[in-house]
Image (cartoon, rainbow, N blue to C red):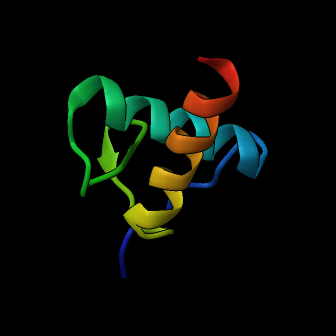
Amino acid sequence: MGFRVIRSAGDEKVYVTQAYEMVQQGTWFVQYFQASLDFYKGPFHYWGVVLGTRTLIV
């Protein structure tokens, strides 16, 4: 059995944080959560988050 991380924050906060980390680290196909690999959602979801924040926040 594997170890599963229980997310302490709301889902939206986690998604935005992971998208931000993807931009900062330049890992557009691999997402991390608390320094461990996390494939809860595919990269397309996070790309949408990045695109949405870039167009709204500029």
Judge from the rendering whether residue 53 lies leftward or rightward of residue 25; answer left or right. right
- The quadrant in which the C terminus is found is top right
Number of numbered labels in the structure image: 0
Give coordinates of residue 27: x percent, y percent: 21, 42
Percent position of residue 38, x then y = 39, 58
Q: Residue at x 44, y 65 (%)?
A: 44
Residue toward you, 10 or 50 = 50
1 and 37: which one is in front? 37
The answer to which quarter of the image holds residue 21 is top left
Name the foreground residue: 43 vs 14.
43
**In the image, residue 57 above or below residue 8:** above
Determine the residue located farthest toward the right in the rendered image: 10
Instruction: Using the image, determine if residue 2 lies above or below residue 58.
Output: below
Position of 34 with respect to 27 (left or right) is right
Name of the residue lying farthest toward the bottom: 1
**Res 16 quadrant in image:** top right
Is 28 on the left or on the right of 42, as rendered? left
Position above or below: 19 against 38? above
Residue 47 x %, y %: 45, 52
The picture quadrant where one finds residue 34 is: top left
Q: Quadrant of the N terminus?
A: bottom left
Q: Residue at x 73, y 51 (%)?
A: 11
Q: Is residue 33 above or below residue 3?
A: above
